[in-house]
Image (tube, rainbow, N blue to C red):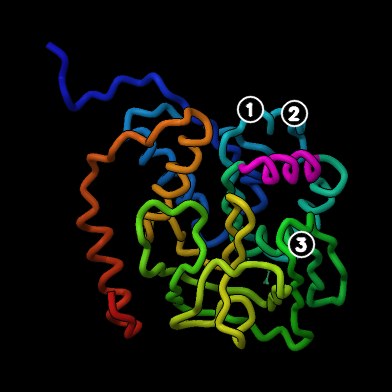
Amino acid sequence: MKNNHTPTIHHSLTLGWLYPELMSTYGDRGNVIVLQKRAQWRGINIKIERINQNTNYKLLTTCDLLFMGGAQDIQQEIVNEDLLTNKGNKISEMIEDDTPALFICGAYQLMGNYYLDSNGVKINGLGLFDMYTQAPQTGERLIGNIVIQPKSIPHSLLPIPYLTGFENHGGRTYLSNKSQAFAQVISGYGNNGNDKTEGAVYKNAIGTYLHGPILPANPELADNLLEKTFARKYGIKLPSNKTDDTFSKKAKGNILKKLKASY
Ligand code: GLN
């Protein structure tokens, strides 16, 4: 007899994990684990392709979803060199073609028009998000726990009232009038500590400063990414999730209470 709890694996997704060795600070790899587990718990097979400087850019064409974590300026420079000369065009093409993607902190900065680092070096980005980032000469960083209220999660099926995370960045990001912020800051700094915007959204790509890592702290965002990826690939709704999120909800509730945002 078939065990109802054993999912039949007949759908599969490929996650392109960009520069895992260089771009993965503050536990960003936890995002990959959460996407993998939450897909598997739905009976979806998930393949993780680690993509670094030595990988042929053509491997990107097999990916249904992209993820890149954060890092410091030195790693960003190395990675950006490869992006501009090797993989950037393909990544831009995929984002234009509605591939879902999540870019954290240093990765988010590289997807803007440019990043002016703390030494005054200008690192040209891919320009997916219409924004620029500038690091202060003084080295003052924006560090701490953060709560944001999403404004524009692309094709969100479920309302996501608040997201929590941890930010640590020197760069201040400024969005152009045309670009869409990902969220509004409820508590913390966000893009620049002044205008209350956090992150950016373009098509199905999200850029955000939230480490934490963001997806274990906010599994509903992981589900949203999986929903979009699955619907884009198979044209059907993502199978429902039988997981018990009691503990992650409790943890998030406590953080929100601490940071004085109602949940
Ligand atoms: N170099 C960037 C900054 O400090 C990114 C930091 C990060 O990814 N945590 O602004």
Secondary structure found at label 3: helix
Q: Where is residue 117 in the image (x, y as percent from the top left)?
A: 79, 73
- Residue 34, magenta (yes or no): no
Q: What residue type is labelled 2?
A: Lys
* Residue 7 at least partly seen: yes
Q: In this view, does 37 lie above or below 164?
A: above
Q: Which amino acid does label 3 sit on?
A: Ile
Which residue is disc 1 drawn over?
62
Q: Position of residue 176 (x, y in %)?
A: 73, 73
Residue 212, above or below 155: below
Identify the residue under disc 3: 74
In magenta, the rendered stretch is 87-98
How much space separates mark 1 and mark 3, taking CA atoms? 29 Å
Query: Looking at the rendered structure, which numbered label has been put on residue 58?
Result: 2
Q: Please tell me whether residue 117 is drawn above or below residue 230 in the rendered image.
A: below
Question: Dot 2 lies on which element?
Answer: helix
